[in-house]
């Protein structure tokens, strides 16, 4: 096990100025602490694509409330437009296929940037229809790619829009009602004003410092969450404790796709160690990881305010994870 002194030495070696770390043991002993600039203590980090994991937990809660169905067509939840394939034919892709990145959506390269691209936050429908600088064409399905894994932010934008349409509310309010408020996750937010006030600065591989706004992704379900390791550990602890999620929902999290053994629902799974699930976050100025287990409360969450330019497992986060496990 690592000590704070050891972590501080590793942070200096990897040029990481702020780190947020939480672990849960087999006995449900939670340890959480931040290291680095003390003026940022308690502040939020950009979770980037760990946002997708949290979104899937919300979806599973809505499924339990019979608001959504994993195998319903996504078009069933849209009223003002229809998601089509490349031939203009309404698509039959499902919520489950979108969650597992197997809906036949191939995102355009160099899209889905941060607020640096644009000063206004558009509606999710505007993004989906290609009416913003964030995504420059309408989202559509490539029918021959359905069932093949293509990591997609567009897919989670569609999921967000379906959730908002189904619940007649904003994604942020729904998440607060179902997840943040019941679990007292008071340091988790999608609100830009709060993030600018309480967010940590990010650092790019070249050492340039970026403000929270420049690291803010206006796609809450896909990559917009700012949070702390402690809040994420609270969520993982709830998931692995009886009562928050049903046994079926917990089983679904780790259930792989029929065509890809590495893709669960909101988690990536190692086929050689299928009881362990991973969620990764990587964006402007930040990197992160969440690791949890199917049949144990044991977990590891690490948020870093530096984009090291290499995969999380190859940088400081990977070094910490290997030492912990």
Image: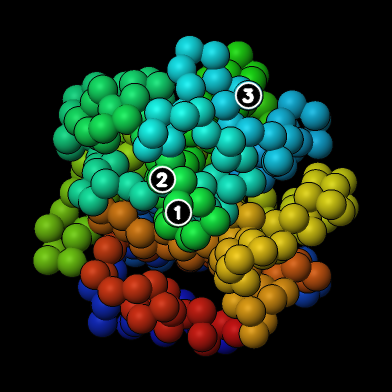
Name the residue that disc number 1 marks: 145
Name the residue that disc number 3 marks: 76
SS assignment at label 3? helix
Is there a contact, CB below 8 Å, between mark 1 and mark 2? yes
Q: Residue 163's spot in the image, x, y percent?
A: 59, 27
Q: Residues within 10 Å of mark 1 (few under 14, many from 20)?
A: some
Eye-nearest disc, 3 or 2: 2
Residue shown at 58%/36% (left/top)?
A: 92
Residue shown at 12%/66% (left/top)?
A: 206
Q: Is residue 125 visible?
A: yes
SS assignment at label 2? loop
Q: Quadrant of residue 209?
A: bottom left
Q: Residue 220's spot in the image, x, y percent?
A: 45, 36
Is there a contact, CB below 8 Å, between mark 3 and mark 2? no
Q: Is residue 33 left or right of residue 105?
A: right
Q: Nearer the viewer, residue 15 or 221?
A: 221
Q: Is residue 90 above or below residue 299?
A: above
Separation of marks 3 and 2 at Cα, in angstroms: 19 Å
Total marks shown come to 3
Q: Residue 259's spot in the image, x, y percent?
A: 61, 66
Instruction: Locate the N terminus and report the quarter of the image it occupies.
Output: bottom right
Q: Nearer the viewer, residue 122 or 320?
A: 122
Q: Is residue 46 visible?
A: no
Q: Residues within 10 Å of mark 2 (few under 14, many from 20)?
A: some
SS assignment at label 1? helix
């Amino acid at each position: 096990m690592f000590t704070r002194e050891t972590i501080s030495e590793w942070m200096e070696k990897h040029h990481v100025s702020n780190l947020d770390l939480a672990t849960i043991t087999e006995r449900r002993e939670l340890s959480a602490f931040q290291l680095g600039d003390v003026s940022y203590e308690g502040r939020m980090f950009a979770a980037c694509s760990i946002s997708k994991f949290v979104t899937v937990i919300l979806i599973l809660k809505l499924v339990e409330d019979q608001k959504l169905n994993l195998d319903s067509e996504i078009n069933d939840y849209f009223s003002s437009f229809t998601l089509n394939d490349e031939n203009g034919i309404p698509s039959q892709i499902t919520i489950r296929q979108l969650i597992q990145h197997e809906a036949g959506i191939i995102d355009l390269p160099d899209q889905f940037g941060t607020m640096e691209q644009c000063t206004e936050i558009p509606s999710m429908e505007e993004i989906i229809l290609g009416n913003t600088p964030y995504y420059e064409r309408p989202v559509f399905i490539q029918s021959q790619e359905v069932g093949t894994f293509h990591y997609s932010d567009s897919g989670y934008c569609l999921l967000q829009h379906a959730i908002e349409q189904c619940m007649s509310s904003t994604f942020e309010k729904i998440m607060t009602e179902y997840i943040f408020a019941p679990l007292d996750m008071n340091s988790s937010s999608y609100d830009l004003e709060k993030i600018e006030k309480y967010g940590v600065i990010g650092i790019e591989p070249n050492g340039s410092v970026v403000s929270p706004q420049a690291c803010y992704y206006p796609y809450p379900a896909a990559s917009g969450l700012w949070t702390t390791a402690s809040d994420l550990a609270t969520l993982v602890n709830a998931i692995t404790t009886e009562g928050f999620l049903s046994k079926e929902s917990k089983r679904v999290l780790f259930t792989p796709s029929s065509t890809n053994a590495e893709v669960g629902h909101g988690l990536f799974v190692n086929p050689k160690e299928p009881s362990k699930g991973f969620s990764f976050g990587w964006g402007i100025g930040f990197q992160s990881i969440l690791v949890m287990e199917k049949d144990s409360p044991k977990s590891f969450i690490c948020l870093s305010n530096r984009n090291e330019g290499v995969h999380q497992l190859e940088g400081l986060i990977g070094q910490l994870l290997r030492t912990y496990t």
